[in-house]
Amino acid sequence: MSTWLSILIAFPVMAGVAWVFRFAGRSATSNKPFFRDMPFGVAFGYVVAAVAILLAFKIYFVDQVLFFRWAMQGLIIFTVSAFLFRLLGRLVGTAGSRKLFRSMPLTAAFGVMIVLAYAILAIFAPVFAPYGEEQVFAAANTLPGSDPATGGDPAHLLGTDQIGRDLMSRLIYGARNTVGIAFATTCLAFFIGGSLGFLAATIGGWLDQVLSRAVDVLMAIPALIFALLLMTIASAWSVKLGIPLTIFMILIIAIIDSTRVYRLARAVGVNIVVMDYIEAAKLRGEGLTYLIFREILPNATAPLLAEFGLRFCFVFLTIASLSFLGVGIQPPLADWGTMVRDLAQFINFAQFSPLTAALPILAAGAIALLTVAVNFIVDWMLQKSSGLKE
Amino acid sequence: MGSVTRIILQRLALGLLTLFIVSIVIFIAVNLLPGDFAEAILGQGATPEAVASIREGLGLDKPPITRYFDWLGGAIQGDLGSSFAQANFASFTGSDAASGTTVAEQIAPRFKNTLFLAGVTAAIAVPVSIFLGVLAALYRNSIFDRATNILTLSSISSPDFFLAYVLILFLSVLNPLLPSLSNIYDGMDFSERLVKSLLPALTLTLAVTAQMMRMTRAAIINLLASPYIEMARLKGISPMRVIVTHALPNALAPIITVIALNLAYLITGVVVVEVVFVYPGIGQLFVDSVKIRDIPVVQACCLIFAAAYILLNLSADVLSILSNPRLRHPK
Amino acid sequence: MSELLLKVRDLMIEGRSDETWNPIINGCSFDLNKGEVLGMIGESGAGKSTVGLAAMGFTRDGCRISGGTVEFDGIDLVNASAAVKRGLLGKRIAYVAQSAAASFNPAHRLIDQHTEGPVQHGVMPREESQEDAMELYRRLRLPNPEEIGFRYPHQVSGGQLQRAMTAMAMACRPDLIIFDEPTTALDVTTQIEVLASIRDIVEQFNTAAIYITHDLAVVAQMADKIKVLLKGDEVEEADTRTMLSDPQEEYTKSLWAVRSFQRPTKPAVPADAVPVVSVKNVSAAYGKVPVLFDVSFDIHAGRTVAVVGESGSGKSTAARCITGLLPPTSGVIEFDGEPIPADYRSRTKMQLRQAQMIYQMADTALNPRKTIGEIIGRPVQFYMGLTGSAKRKRVDELLNEIELEPSQYFHRLPSELSGGQKQRVGIARALAAEPKFIICDEVTSALDQLVAEGILKLLAKLQDELGLSYMFITHDLATVRSIADEVVVMKDGRVVEAGPKKEMFTPPHHAYTDLLLSSVPEMDPDWLTNLLDARGVDNIGDAAVGKM
């Protein structure tokens, strides 16, 4: 309880400090507008931020909490490498790409860097991984750290799982499976939703009505719940037909997700269809194909690309969640969601073997890192296209 | 006032219609199972007698349309049928299938637990996110705004279980402040129940707050750019009053929508979080039933989730209509 | 009288774009005495509104005052604290915005927004301010002054809202009011009422004002002196009569000259000539709502028919009927005396080619993802079947025709062009089809006056060269005067009056045409006064009630 009590006391103290801070600022700068027009809330905010930074230093240097140190070190490494990556992008490449990098905020550079790294990891997984993803070793359940004294094995940097598969290799192959499947699913969803959406926007009438109402109904069921329901049924079929459940999962998620894509594509399409240049093309006597591919689509690429990023994140997280719940990507394929579930109990060893406890966080973090990266890029794109509205 | 009532009645009717169609979709989906339920649950090795007995006990011998209306009629009266897991068990012990636990009995206490969790989450998340959202909008493009942008974006992007395990690591394992297992049961007193559900609630809060905050910020910024806010500032009205009397009445609709949308998101998010913390809610039950293909329970949970989702979206719709002065005061 | 109220010296304002600060206003200075009205004119992007707001010590987000001083009654507004400025705004300096509909808070009644200023500034209590609001509404000739304040903004028409906003600005009896294009969004007949009431009330309370507008004729009625701005620079400043009769700078002279462009009158059309386009007894409806009633008019070869009317009069709908986008419910459209299918989808390529269209908003009329060459080249290829170098040659010809250098513009995107250039590309696209007839839908109303004049001259030149017929849709009578051969006046979906331009501009007119014609502001500073005398003030009040 003393923790809560000290927090309770801290607030009025900080408020007092904030008042003094503002007062001192006003006297010291002889009432410069910065301090003169500073509301009390802002002064308080500065003090809270200062306290938070001090606290972080205390945890890092005094308490020396290992996981916090790792997190901070990771943050610093990522920031520095993103900065260097952006610097590289500004110096090397075509004039267009250099210009792009010049206008890029650090978060977006970080996003691009991570996405590139994942793509390389996924494509060249066999090169990076020390062993095959399904290769089983005699030494099962070895701990990470490569040190035999702490239950590790020099041959397996991150240890092995219950049946003796190398975790490092599975983590790397996970990039290929998890990301690859999510990417394929998103593409499929875009193909279905995008083409139907543009068709509905251009033709309108009953086609638009039927499709839009059907999508309304499908969207009234929460996506993850609907996916779980359909996966239940698919699992029965997959046994009967002998088709891997993963294929069913791709189809199911693609269809569920295509409803969201349909909504956006239709909305974007409708906004473009009302433009005068479309009317001019119609009055010229142009056909439907020309209208969609030459007039509408080129104007819809920017919002669609941003949406692709968002949808990819959503699909990726849905698949990871399904796998985590045990009904997604099926073994023996290596996959991060399943790994998190399998390794989850090790988190309780944090006091004795921090490396082991870090394993589930590492797998979950691998998922989070990619979605954060993609979201950073999308955020930047959206801000760019919205222009100077703010 | 007449037109508002009419619009709201229209929305309500539309909501009911949607729910009705959704129930059909769920029913059809379930009936897409190969063979029928009885075979599906008993597996290949079952005796024909056992299959026939379950088939009869569950009314599977009737045509699908009759079964649909039986199910729907029952569901409206609160009878969601009997659980397969129970029926299966009953068939092996030779007792009457119908006397097994009903789905409703199984769901009711867990549904209450889930509502409790969602309630705790909403109680923390809604005020915090609206407060932070307004702050970020007021001080947009400041360091505070940029930092929260990065933090919230990261939080939205992370899978729920990542947030959950990070919280467990720091708040439960490294500093034993809160329990990482939410084994709550009936008859537990409120404070203990609250402490046990705090970690899952915090996880959900992190996920939902970020989203709600960003949407609130966007809604307010949109509003602050409108000419009537500039007009109010040019009338020499104090910043606080500009927010309270000029921005807030117009921001109600977007903010209500934001809250409802995110409460609806909670429903989905709750599934994963309940599994992580072994919280005995409806999400956990749903996932368990999916794994053992307990169709009646899956069907019922699905319907409840969908109904809650539709209801929340509907109330957002209705509330934002009510807060629109153009509709409240027609010409 | 000549007591100095506002002193602006070397005002510099910067705006933020692409992470850098760029100058918007490069040094602007003026004085304003008590009770004096300064007219501030310039084309779009001249920085008039920015200067107007800066005179209140206010800058919009993303702008900052980077130099110079603004002194209001001895108070330095640039360096004043936020609290000091708040004390002045609304109380001693008030603002009337361009769009009253957007600037009134939709959630509160008019009168509550009116009394907020006086109550917050402690000028007078709520009840007194309410009484005062009704008095102001009466003076501004609003209908039902006792009752109108208790309505919500969306329940009141645009012209009335603009007057209610003027009343709100007057609520604390300020020393200075900034009017930021208060009548730009209104129809001409409504504009008169608002102008007259603004001028009266400013005179009655001896309030100083800065009147910002792009319309010279309006500013001539309102201002004691005029300041001309161009792209953030001051051009010149003088009292109104001097400025109108004897402008010093080239730019000002060219602005003044715009209104003098006029084409020679053409000989009457022979009685037996077959019109290029003939609209015969056309009625049309959007869904079930009828919008056009028995409309008939002819357009002859080489002639320009101006279709005039206020917003909602059905002039654009008539164009949609001719192009076939909105098939009429009854009546026929004839090209060269032959009836053609009502729906554009049933028309032949030849028929579609005959009638082309130029749009009001060049921004939405050109596909932003296509180069100028592609935009103009498409109809060349589609209708004429030209490809490769033949197509390129034809596009170059067309670009020369619209006075854009082909080598320079062929590969550009629309976003790299100015508004006037975009409109020219729209013209070239229409010409590429080699039509007989072009519909010009408000083609100049989104453009600045000088640019608009260039477009009108180009259209006139093309007509003389190619023998084109134009249907010229516009609400601006000045444009009609300069380009039309014949005029069709529309109101509420019906043709009110039609005939050769000369007849239309000489009395006697139909009552509505008369109202429309007399409402167009003229450059004579006494025009409004004379008009009000001629009409009688009560007439305006009636007109306002009539618009309810």
Image (tube, rainbow, N blue to C red):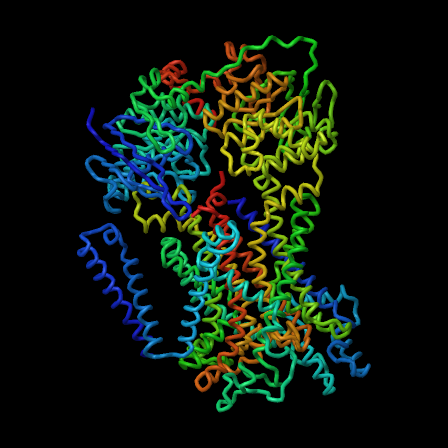
Q: Position of residue A229 (x, y in %)?
A: 66, 68
The residue nearer to you, when weighing A173 against A223, is A173
**Residue A189 located left or right of residue B36:** left
A247, A121: nearer the viewer: A121
Camera-side residue of A389 and B92: A389
Task: Give the residue at x 67% y 62%.
Answer: B23
Tell me what residue is drawn at x 44 percent, y 81 percent: B173
Camera sees residue C377: yes
Q: Which of C315/A94 is in front?
A: A94
Asked if A376 appears above or below C175 in the picture, the reply is below
Residue C287 image offset from top left, x and y in percent:
65, 35
Q: Is residue A358 above or below residue C300?
A: below
- C425 horizontally vs B69: left or right: left
Say left or right for B189 vs A115. left
Q: How many marks?
A: 0
Q: Residue at x 56, y 19 (%)?
A: C460
Which picture quadrant has residue C493? top right
**Identity of the residue furthest to the right in this view:** B48
**Residue A78 at x, y = what percent?**
45, 67
Is A40 on the left or on the right of C42, as rendered?
left
Q: Quadrant of the N terminus of chain C?
A: top left
Q: Is residue A163 above or below residue C344?
A: below
Residue furthest toward the bottom?
A149
